[in-house]
Image (tube, grey):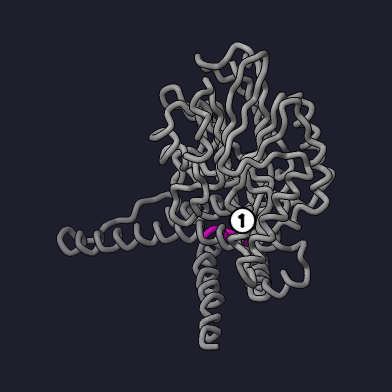
Amino acid sequence: MRSWRYIWVVPIMVLVLDLYVFQAVKAVSQAASPRLRAIIYGVYWVVSILSLLLLCFLPNLYRRFTWMQGYAFFVIIGFYLAKLLTAVFLMVDDLRRVIQWIAGRLLSATRGAVVPSDGISRSVFMSWLGMGVGAGIYASLLYGFSNKYKYRVRRLRLTFENLPASFKGFRIVQISDIHTGSLKNPAAVKRGVDMVMAEKPDLILFTGDLVNNIAPEVGEYQSIFGCLTAPMGIYSTLGNHDYGDYSWWENAESKKANLDHLMRIQNEMGWRLLMNEHVVLERGGEQIAVLGVENWSAKSRFPKYGKLDQAYAGAEKYPFKILMSHDPSHWDAEVRRDYPDIDLTLSGHTHGMQFGLEMPGFKWSPVQYVYREWAGLYEEGRQKLYVNRGFGFIGYPGRVGIMPEITVIELA
């Protein structure tokens, strides 16, 4: 019960933030008429108070209106993120003013009074800049809600000297991170599945995170993803969310039953789940190996269920190898170091953080400060890694700059 005494710290901190940002509002509206200023101030405080009330009652709203989960959180939290960014600019300006004041006092003591320069106040400029940046980020987050089902097909042709001739032109579709527990639009998801089938892949590979937490989340999406077919089959592996590690279970048996249920669902959809094992694909009398490991991460907060040594055993004799490993940190930590003859690794996991910027020759996302390989193609020597940006979403119900991805890989 004692912990509840500190619950008021949050609204107090939020109120302090509101008061601080209000100084920027006052600065940018100082040239307005008294009537307009009163309207601006009134709107600011009405919106701020309503946002604070929503923030306080958000847990109850979540329980009563499940559709608000994610949306309400990011509408409100995004609003305060925008204010926090504005506050950063204000603090920089306040620091500048303190330094300027100290310097002015020192100079006035030795050389007389310092005459202030003419022109627009830098405080007003910084206020406009901070509010502009904050509003831009907030607007992008709101706009991003509309992007979560805008699937983008990314095609690439990968050349390998040791690829058997019969597999030249072999087409692989990779999808990853479906997160069915977040999906709310079956028709939109079906369009994404139709886009996969339109590519006429020889092979479909799914690199983990079918659910957010529990197997029943698949629900009606089982029949949708069960429509996927490919001549050489559909193979999958597990991601960190598939084990139920982020849910509470009465006992270990319940947790295991959930994972068994998820494995049955994949089997019923016609997907072959690779659990630290490999399969051999044959075409034109030549063979390659597809390996799949359970989740293995070099990051301490994620589990290491994968056993690449088990998946690799017996595959060394095949001239070309593809590895499915959900977490891209596995590539640097073990794959490249200990298995230099694994030619192509396919991963997901990062989602590109569902937020960033991509343009020809340039890409950026905050996730790159955590993951060295976080989206797209990476090459070291003869080995290649491709990190899929994810088919679905989790947490933030949207995408800004980093669109949901269907990857089409042609081997050459």
**In the image, residue 30 lies in the stretch drawn in magenta:** yes
Please provide percent x and percent y for residue 63: 74, 72
- Residue 337 screen position, x and y as percent: 38, 34
Question: Which of the two residues, 263 or 302, is positioned nearer the viewer here?
Answer: 263
Q: Is residue 38 visible?
A: no
Helix, strand or loop at mark 1: helix
Left or right: 248 as drawn, with respect to 381: right
Q: Which residue is mark 1?
A: 243
Q: In terms of secondary structure, what is the magenta stretch mainly? A: loop
Query: What residue span does the magenta drawing correspond to?
Result: 27-34
| Residue occupying image coordinates x 68% and y 29% | 173
Q: Is residue 125 visible?
A: yes
Quarter of the image for residue 77 reads bottom right
Q: Quadrant of residue 277?
A: top right
Q: Quadrant of the N terminus?
A: bottom right
Is 85 on the left or on the right of 65, as rendered?
Answer: left
The residue located at (47%, 41%) in the rendering is: 330
Residue at image coords 71%, 52%: 262
